[in-house]
Amino acid sequence: MTINDRGTWGSRFGFVLAAAGSAVGLGNIWGFPTKVGQNGGGAFVLVYLACVIFICLPILIAELAIGRHTKSDPVKAYARLRPGTRWWMAGALGVAAGFGVLSFYSVIAGWALAYIWFSATGSVSSGALESATFFTEFTARAPINLMLTFVMLAATAGVLLGGIRSGIERVSKFLMPVLALLLVGLAIRAVTLPGAAEGVAYYLKPDFSKVMNFGTLNAALGQAFFSLSLGLGTMLVYGSYLTRREGIAKAAVMVVVVDTCLALLAGFMIFPSGFSIPGFDPSSQGPGLIFVVLPRLFASLPGGQFFGAAFFILLTLAALTSAISLLEVPVAHFIDSHGWGRSRAVLVVMMATFALAIPSVLASGANDFFTSLPVIGLDFLTVMITVWNDFALPLGGLFTAVFVGYVWRIDNALEELLAEQAWFPGRQFWGLLIRYACPAAIFLIIFGTLQSLIA
Ligand code: PFF
């Protein structure tokens, strides 16, 4: 396959929509509120915003620039810019992370899929079982969860097999505004529930004593990388399908604004609903937060079964557009670097990801297959989330910043970024962030966390 056969985004905004489709997903609606809950509320939100603006936005621009310049998958992109060096390994880390992240992402996407049914039929909020118990018992049922994970992966693969880039673009154009509207509506309902004020206060009032430790900074940075699909080459690959007509900086700002607004909105939906339940403790909630809290919100709404089902349909579709972008990274790698055909790459990558997902299914919620093993003793799903989100993605971002800042160099990157007189105010500041602030902050946070883990 030559460079010119790879294809480009169809419409003018196709790229922004597809990139926003990749960015907006479980990370916004499930991951963000979960992390806020585990890390002390409002102050975490501020740290998160700082990570997004000063670390992630500059790296998003850098990833897109490498992608558009090289028109290759991450491994080949680095190799092309610095042949004969080990820089290709930075791309290889991204390809591995694509498998790793998708292996747990598809499990959670499977839960979202099942909750469409549970909400529509009212079984989750029937009152026979508490929503928390319902969730724990549901995730412990391995066969059904394996099936759901497989269905989500197969749907993702099906989309990529069909080469439906214009399909993704069209679907995203319709889906993103509907998702935003639904979130606004549900957030309004949530903040008007009795007892909601406590939740709003928890979400908005910063208590800095809770965030001033490396673990929390690390969680904020990892979450920001995850939410913006950074650090594993997704945006590099999406950038590689970009033409020089589309200004990178402007597109990047749009993606960041959409992604961040939707995450913040999800918090306004979750915390007021949570706090309206007597005895709710946000910090004790794990990955099940939205699956436990939201069914209660829906139960309090007239037509809640309908809204609940609609919400989980959108969540599943938002997860799908993100899963597509995750699978596309290893797929693009096998096509670009190993000359495989698209169908073979999609099928092999999908089956390998499914195999990797099995332990996450077997060891989440109440299913204690791994938790009962003396050596592991941990929820495998949580381990996967920590390894990939909190470490692999920021590390990938560190490599991108060092590569663009010191190896490819700012001037060459700017030449790509300013092609066709593209809009890029603050380009000098961007160079400074990429060369100094991003590497220093990521390095400090990752190694500070490692040190506190060892100590
Ligand atoms: N950004 C997606 C979300 O917030 O759900 C998840 C994701 C997609 C992470 C693609 C990383 C990635 F490369």
Image (cartoon, helix red, strand yellow):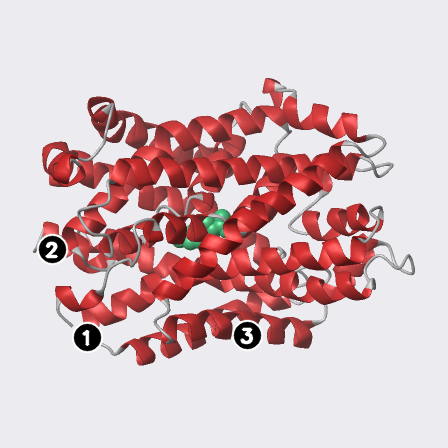
Q: Position of residue 362 (x, y in %)?
A: 63, 68
The image quadrant that residue 170 belongs to is bottom left
- Reading the image, the residue beneath label 1 is 339
Picture quarter containing residue 51? Answer: top left
- The answer to whether residue 151 is above or below residue 61 is below
Task: State whether residue 318 appears in this view.
Answer: yes
Indicate left or right for 39 with 237 as reference: right
Q: Which element carries disc 3, helix, strand or loop?
A: helix
Q: Residue at x 22, y 37 (%)?
A: 402
Q: Amino acid at mark 3?
A: Phe
Residue 186 image point, x, y percent:
70, 42
**Residue highlighted by disc 3:** 150
Q: Which residue is mark 2?
A: 80
Please indicate whether residue 252 sits to the left or right of residue 47 in the image: left
Residue 151 or residue 247, whichever sits in front: 247
Q: Residue at x 46, y 69 (%)?
A: 156
